[in-house]
Amino acid sequence: RKLVGKVTTGSETFDALMGGGFETQAIVEVYGEFGSGKTQVAHQVAVNVQLPAEEGGLNGSVIIIDTENTFRPERIAQMVEGLPPSGEPEKPREPEEFLRNIHVARAYNSNHQILLAESALDLAEKMKKSGKPARLLIVDSLTAHFRAEYVGRGTLADRQQKLNKHLHTLMRFADLNNAVVLVTNQVMAKPDAFFGDPTKPVGGHIVGHTATFRIYLRKSKGEKRIARLIDSPNLPDGEAVFAVTSAGLMD
Ligand code: ATP
Ligand code: MG
């Protein structure tokens, strides 16, 4: 087993909640209501994972499966500009370079999403030889297509089976590439008819040794957001307050 890596969120309190950052060989599920900041967290981690270890990254590239067409290159550029000063001020960071290391695929439906996750395994295998292997896979949103397509009680078991298989592919990705897999999941403030209690695991119990971290995000005053870690395998439950600003995530 390879040593677990950690990627900074950009916020010290959020990192501390996560035991130092988002772990590799794990699926991190960020869930919360619309506008709670799930996609913002995904964009920030897509920037930060590319940084060198001294700056909280893994010197890696990123694969994004975008199911809601919410990936914004301009936002990545803004976050690169907003990074804290680097240890090498003579080498300015180029937003273009960060964007080149982010491979985005749009998923048009749940079956397409499943296929793209399988293709991501092949793509990452090819990228292993490059200087920037894939160390982050984002699925934003994990559940939107499944929710839209599998409506009604009769289709629940089918949806669950598909989602479980998809999660297994994602776990394989995390393990084979020593990567972080970050998935988002929109939940309603009230328990949702399909996914039930938002504090219960979506997709049921996940087997295998890959850890799963569940983070419940909610809005606070202004730019402030609250992240709550729920039922982590090896970390205490707790909360962290951070900010989503034009420069990105920070304390
Ligand atoms: P959904 O469930 O609808 O996908 P989400 O949880 O992904 O929602 P985000 O898109 O991550 O929500 O959050 C949107 C919020 O992030 C905005 O309402 C704003 O508060 C903040 N935000 C987005 N872009 C910027 C920016 N450039 N500068 C500052 N804040 C921003
Ligand atoms: Mg979003």
Image: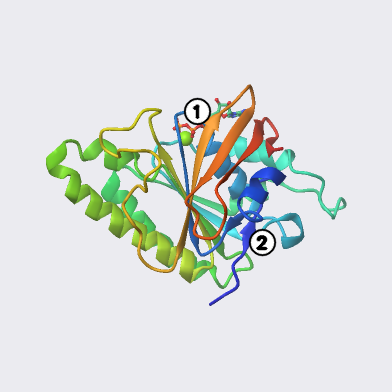
The answer to whether residue 72 shows anywhere in this view is: no
Q: Is mark 1 within 8 Å of ligand 1?
A: yes
Residue drawn at x 54%, y 60% as measured from the top left: 234
Residue drawn at x 43%, y 36% as measured from the top left: 69
The amino acid type, in three-letter code, at marker 1 is Gly
Task: Say whether disc 2 or disc 1 marks the residue closer to the N-terminus.
Answer: 1
Q: Is mark 2 within 8 Å of ligand 1?
A: no
Element at label 2: loop
The C terminus lies in quadrant:
top right
Q: Position of residue 154 (x, y in %)?
A: 12, 42
Viewer-closest of 12 and 99: 12
Q: Position of residue 90 (x, y in %)?
A: 87, 52
Q: Which residue is mark 1?
A: 35
Mark 2 to mark 1 CA distance (whole Å): 29 Å
Tell me if mark 2 has few (under 14), some (14-19) or many (20+) residues whose alpha carbon lies within 10 angstroms of its own. some
Residue drawn at x 85%, y 55% as measured from the top left: 88
The amino acid type, in three-letter code, at marker 2 is Asn
Location of residue 238 by image quarter: top right
Cβ–Cβ under 8 Å for marks 2 and 1 = no
Asked if residue 137 is positioned above or below residue 38 in the image, the reply reads below
Element at label 1: loop
Q: Which residue is mark 2?
A: 59
Q: Position of residue 78 (x, y in %)?
A: 67, 36
Location of residue 149 by image quarter: top left
Tell me if mark 1 has few (under 14), some (14-19) or many (20+) residues whose alpha carbon lies within 10 angstroms of its own. few
Location of residue 246 by image quarter: top right
Front: mark 2 or 1? 1
